[in-house]
Image (tube, rainbow, N blue to C red):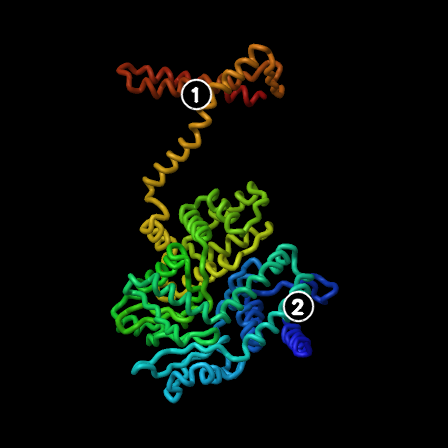
Amino acid sequence: MRGYYFRYLQVLVRFLPIAIAFLRDRRRFLLFGPPRQISTAAHRDRAERLTETMLDLGPAFIKVGQVLSTRPDIVPPTYVDVLATLQDEVPESTGGEPLNVVESELGDELDLETLEPVAGGSLAFVYTVEYDGERIALKVRRPDLASVIERDLRVIRGFVPVIAMFADERQRYSLENVTDDFEAIILDELDFEREASIMAEIRSNVADDDRVRIPATYPEFCSDRVVAMEYVDGEKITNDRALADAGIEPSEMATLVFQTYLKMGLVDGTFHADPHPGNLAVTDDGQLVIYDYGMSQRLTAQEQEDIAKLYRSLVRRDVDDLLNTLIALGVLEPTVDRTAVRQVLELVIQNLEGRSEITWRSIITELLTMLHDFPFRIPPNVMLLVRVGTIGEGVCRSLDPEFDFISVTRSFLVDHGFIENELEALIDEVRDDLRKSVPVLARAPARFDTVFGQLERGDLVVRTAPVESTANGDTAVGYAVLSGSFVVAAAVLTFHERPLEVVSALLALVFLGQYVRCRRRS
């Protein structure tokens, strides 16, 4: 426990200046004074200091920052943008020497003299080693990492009640839920056997697409601390020269990336959730390579169906479907005021339609910003999908600045049968309306008979509110009606052989003059 308290104090000292700055935004002198107006540039500087602090504090805090970058319900947009830049690059010494794990688990089975370091991350280090005349890759978890992360997670949980004291009600609701969510995500990343199985599953799912390459795993060398896989060399996907050498257009690669991730989430149900440029590469022959499956997830059949509905309702601007889907996914409570939320969602759609450019990030930001008055949460699976969409779209736009998220998504949904073309959609809507109307029409004769019976017996009474009227009526209204009638008559008589329309037009002017005269008198 002494290590826990020391770490708690260490974290407190590191974050205290940033916390004081936030408190001064509310009250200039902490306990009293007016709120301060802070510029966007100042917030960005503060967000960068926060990001650097999380990098210094180690793996658990890096993961917290990555999770918070997908939570605009807790973190302001400027901070979301900066936290999204957090990557897994930390010193190899953090969490112990990974080489010790390789020696203890694979020293008797592999020639460690051929071992070469490749890259380091917040949770693991990657090596290549010779095996059967080829090089394979080893992702090795840092040996002391589990205990370090478990301690830091306890520290973070200890800070949540303190942070909640200064948060508003909406943020407090989100904070209570997000702690459990990112603990689950981080602990899943520590399970390398799970990562190897998901990696093998995704490889099987994309086996029919020769444009995508997932490294094969070596189960005999995999364990809870090691993932052994095929070594696939490639250049970073944002390398324009590599794409040109492979003979593939950046726009083509952008579409392939987004369609691949849509298929993972909506068709296969198992998806890679960390598509930043460091995890995406292109081979010499133009294949898309995806690395690092620590942050990945499996969806249930119901979750797949609900998420498909979410995409469909966004593409078709269907507010009712969007509301029902948000409730089904657990984002909104079933007891939420549906009428109020529906009005908010209609406003979101209107705001988005008024923009020249619609992006996934703008949709999510607008949606969550407008829902801030309602208690909502983002479940872990939905949070990871938000992350996939946001980061994946960023990669696609770096490849193709004109990348159209809505168009690519619509094409994918149509091609895979999630939505119909416009004619089929119209027919389905008519069919649904008829299906819902038939029971009502079938019960209508019985209801009419009941109403007529009540009328005959004098049981049915209709009450109307009295309408105020002038004592002598309004003569001007009569002149207006007559003038309008003669205008219509003149228009009809225009097609007659005789010039009768002239008479009608003159009468219309006469009565119009009478109308104006009456109005002036009154």
Residue linked to disc 1: 484
Q: Estimate the x, y position of residue 484 in percent, counting from the top left.
A: 43, 20
In this view, 516 is above or below 387: above
Say which element carries label 2: helix
Where, quadrant-wise, is the C terminus in this rendering?
A: top right
Q: Residue 146 carries which label?
A: none
Mark nearer the viewer, 2 or 1: 2
493 or 352, nearer to the observer: 352
* Left or right: residue 59 compared with residue 404: right
516 or 216, nearer to the observer: 216
Q: Estimate the x, y position of residue 349 in percent, counting from the top left.
A: 47, 47
- Asked whether the viewer can see residue 185, the reply is yes
Indicate the amino acid at tag 2. Gly
* Left or right: residue 279 compared with residue 348: left
At 35% across and 21% down in the image, what residue appears?
491
Residue linked to disc 2: 158
Q: Estimate the x, y position of residue 26 in percent, counting from the top left.
A: 67, 62
User: Earlier along the polypeptide chain: callout 2 or callout 1?
Assistant: 2
